[in-house]
Image (cartoon, rainbow, N blue to C red):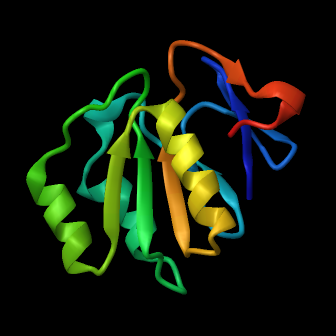
């Protein structure tokens, strides 16, 4: 999986256009049923806790800016052995790509930002 670009509508991931918020898993991409960072909950994060093999790191992209999540949600993920990085979506895409390149077991929950970006040559870094 490689995030090539994003727009206000969604993401280009490994050549596929994904509309809206998405969960980028080690071997698949799913629609993620959140409308904004306010919708991120224990339930919406449960998908990431159920993965086998278990992910090491979950990168959350909360849109145009970093948004605070409830500490209890982050604590629950840590108790399950999953580190969580909360970032604006642009940085979350870059972090996900870096961690994938390092062969880490990583997933991302991404909410489209209000601005679009595709890196030169069609690859988002």
Rendering quarter of residue 76: bottom left
Residue at 32%, 60% (x, y): give it.
Answer: 84
Q: Nearer the viewer, residue 52 or 43?
A: 52
**Is 96 on the left-hand or right-hand side of 49?**
right
Against 14, is 9 above or below? above
Against 66, is 107 above or below? below
Rendering quarter of residue 18: top right
Residue at 71%, 69% (x, y): give it.
Answer: 27
Q: Is residue 24 visible?
A: no
Q: Give x and y (percent) for residue 125.
A: 68, 40
Q: Nearer the viewer, residue 63 or 42?
A: 63
Residue at 76%, 28% (x, y): give it.
Answer: 119
Residue at 33%, 73% (x, y): give it.
Answer: 82
Quadrant in which the N terminus is drawn: bottom right
**Is 74 on the left-hand or right-hand side of 47?**
left
**Is 30 on the left-hand or right-hand side of 74?**
right
Q: Is residue 30 visible?
A: yes
Q: Give x and y (percent) for residue 7.
A: 66, 21
Against 12, is 63 above or below? above
Q: Nearer the viewer, residue 60 or 45?
A: 60
Q: Give x and y (percent) for residue 13.
A: 75, 45
Against 20, is 26 above or below? below
Rendering quarter of residue 124: top right
Question: From this viewpoint, which residue is outermost toward the bottom?
Answer: 53
Q: Give x and y (percent) for residue 38.
A: 26, 32
Count numbered badges in the picture: 0
Question: From this viewpoint, which residue is outermost toward the top?
Answer: 115
């Amino acid at each position: 999986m490689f995030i090539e670009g994003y727009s206000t509508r969604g993401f280009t991931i490994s050549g596929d256009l994904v509309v809206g918020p998405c969960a980028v898993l080690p071997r698949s991409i799913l629609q993620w049923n959140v409308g904004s960072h306010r919708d991120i909950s224990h339930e919406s994060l449960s998908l990431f806790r159920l993965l086998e093999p278990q992910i090491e790191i979950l990168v959350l992209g909360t849109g145009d800016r970093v948004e605070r999540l409830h500490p209890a949600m982050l604590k629950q993920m840590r108790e399950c052995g999953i580190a969580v990085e909360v970032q604006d979506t642009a940085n979350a895409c870059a972090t996900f790509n870096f961690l994938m390149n390092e062969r880490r077991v990583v997933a991302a929950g991404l909410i489209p930002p209000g601005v679009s970006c595709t890196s030169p040559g069609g690859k988002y870094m």
